[in-house]
Amino acid sequence: MIMSFVSPEPVNEPYRQTTSFSGSGSTTLEDDGATEKKIVPHPWSGVAPRIQMLFAEVGRLLRYVYTPSLATTVPAQVETLLKSAKELEEELLSADIPGPDDIVDTGDARTSKQDFIIIADVTRCSALLEIYRVFPNLLQSRLGGGIPFAFGSSIEALDDFDYEAEPSRWLTSFAIYILENLGKIPSSSGTRPLQLILLNVCANELRLSSVHASSADLGDVMAQNIQTYKSRSFVMSRLLELSTRLPAKPVLKIIDLIKEVWRRSDLGENLFWMEIMNQNGWQTVMG
């Protein structure tokens, strides 16, 4: 998944249609001769390969947006990018995630069925987080138009968040929610290769809100900042653990990138992590 975001190869089109995608990646087995089939988890696509593929397409779209030579302000091209983002949003929101009874037990004591289910949900949410960060009009349309999220009670609770007042705080709350889910998976889980890019994506939105004494919601702002610090601590802790279980060099470079994102965010800069990655030429090391 990470290569779709960091590959130095040029992107010639922002989004490839996914309607012909057949769901390859996971396989299915007959359940003792019954008509019901079960999903065999795949080490790279888990139990929801379509969500993994859509996440990769979001990466390609954003890489197109943040490739300097392709940057555009031509209305027709901007509209095309927005249309692609909306199609991906709708596909992600409608994608199915299997339940425990739909999944074959791999026999790996370190990796439960629930680990794969959480990874699928976190991947979907992380893809939406990226879309809403880069295309805020889509989130504004969904929330402002009263269009509910079709899944997840915790996400539905965000519907009442005052997005128009501080959109960045909504994104931070969403990122915190995603990381809380990811934290339910142990670092020893066989899903750990899939966690890297998800941690990086969510870490980008762990932004601190300015605290003003006159703010009517001062308590809420301070509470969110405390939770943001806790989430930052979790991200660093999990990445350091993963650096001992996965090739260390790309993991440590992701840590460098996240620290730089936070440093510049805390200084008031509003840069996206892909911009900072491109500025420092870290794509090849991370991939």
Image (tube, grey):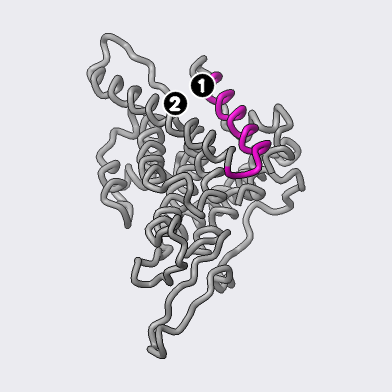
Q: Amino acid at mark 1?
A: Ser
Residue 71 at least partly seen: no
Can you give x and y, in whole percent of width and height, for residue 224 in the image? 32, 26
Closer to the N terminus: mark 1 or mark 2?
2
For residue 7, above or below residue 233: below
Q: Amino acid at mark 2?
A: Arg
Q: Are marks 1 and 2 in contact (CB under 8 Å)?
A: yes
For residue 281, above or below residue 110: above
Q: From which residue to which does the magenta span run? A: 245-265
Which residue is the site of mark 2? 207
Can you give x and y, in whole percent of width and height, for residue 46 in the image? 50, 61
Query: Most prominent secondary structure in the magenta stretch?
Result: helix
**SS class, disc 1:** helix
Residue 207 at least partly seen: yes
User: Residue at 42% of width from left, 69% of height from top?
Assistant: 105
| Left or right of 178 on screen, residue 40 | right
User: Residue at 41% of width from left, 22% of height from top?
Assistant: 208
Which residue is the site of mark 1? 265
Q: Residues within 10 Å of mark 2 (few under 14, many from 20)?
A: many
Residue closest to the eye, 110 or 238: 110
- Image quadrant of residue 101? bottom left
Confirm whether the magenta stretch covers residue 69. no
User: Residue at 65% of width from left, 50% of height from top?
Assistant: 4
